[in-house]
Image (cartoon, rainbow, N blue to C red):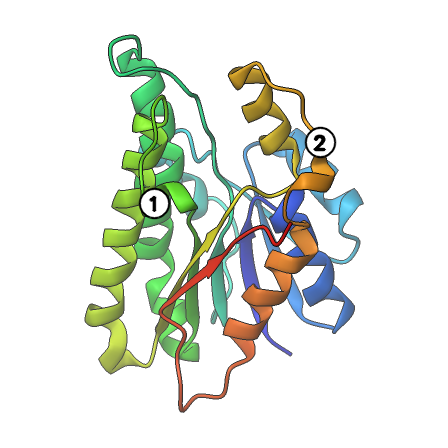
């Protein structure tokens, strides 16, 4: 039985991945921003354990983890959580930049740093759910795209650094996926949201499990998933 730590397991891609891993009997550790959210995640994914740590405040993650029991080994660290706040460069405030850079880039880096010893023990897998915006930036997406471009750089550097330790690193770049985040994006864009137009989270979950389950003789570095409609 493998042990996975998942961020963003409350909805969308993260919830689909957590459900699929639990169904096959794997052990789940779900990151929650606070105790209230931890209870919600435990109810959504019965049998899973929770770990409290706020991705909006990466400076406090080390302290938070020191107060809680941690796994001895970790087969995968799945960075799926993310936030987005659209806006033109001439209008975005430092608060909007810090929000997205902290949650989408700095916290994944800090989580990885804190959990690398357990990942090395298991020769585990670090998987980053990036975005199409991590490859190409569009108008009003500057801060989010910058955080995701940075996440690609983090993954690429980590892959080279940890190859000798047997830790695999994958970046997945989904296009627009039907999720609560996508609904919020459409609201920010002032557009009507039709989930049928976008990728089903289960389809992205399938690609993530494929990368995790690949035999040890191979590694998926970068995987792009686009809407088929």
C-alpha span from label 1 to label 2: 23 Å
Image point (53%, 53%), residue name? 226
Image point (47%, 31%), residue name? 83
| Relative horizontal placement of residue 127, taking residue 10 as reference (left or right) | left
Q: Secondary structure at mark 1?
A: helix
Q: Which residue is mark 1?
A: 134
User: Visible in this render: residue 110?
Assistant: no
* Tally of marks: 2
Local crowd at mark 2 within 10 Å, few (<14), some, or many (≥20)? few
Coordinates of residue 105 in the picture (x, y in percent): 32, 41
**57 and 82: which is toward the camera:** 82
Q: Are marks 1 and 2 in contact (CB under 8 Å)?
A: no
Question: Which comes sooner in the sequence, label 1 or label 2?
Answer: 1
Query: Mark 1 or mark 2, which is nearer to you?
Result: 2
| Mark carried by residue 179 | none
Q: Which residue is mark 2?
A: 194
Coordinates of residue 71 in the picture (x, y in percent): 51, 64
The quadrant where residue 11 appears: top right
């Amino acid at each position: 039985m493998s042990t996975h730590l998942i961020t963003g397991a409350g909805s969308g891609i993260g919830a689909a991945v957590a459900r699929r891993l639990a169904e096959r009997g794997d052990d789940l550790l779900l990151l929650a921003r606070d105790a209230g959210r931890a209870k919600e995640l435990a109810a959504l994914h019965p049998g899973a354990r929770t770990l409290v740590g706020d991705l909006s405040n990466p400076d406090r993650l080390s302290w938070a983890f020191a107060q809680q029991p941690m796994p001895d080994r970790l087969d995968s660290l799945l960075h799926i959580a993310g936030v987005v706040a659209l806006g033109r460069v001439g209008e975005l405030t430092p608060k909007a930049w810090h929000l997205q850079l902290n949650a989408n880039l700095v916290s994944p880096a800090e989580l990885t740093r804190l959990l690398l010893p357990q990942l090395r023990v298991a020769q585990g897998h670090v998987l980053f759910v990036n975005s199409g915006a991590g490859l190409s930036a569009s108008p009003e997406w500057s801060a989010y795209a910058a955080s995701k471009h940075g996440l690609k750089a983090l993954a690429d550097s980590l892959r080279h650094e940890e190859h000798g330790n047997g830790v695999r690193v994958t970046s997945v770049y989904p296009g627009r996926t039907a999720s609560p985040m996508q609904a919020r994006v459409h609201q920010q864009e002032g557009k009507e949201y039709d989930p049928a137009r976008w990728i089903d989270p289960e389809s992205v979950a399938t690609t993530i499990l494929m990368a995790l389950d690949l035999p040890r003789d191979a590694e998926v570095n970068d995987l792009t998933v686009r809407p088929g409609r």
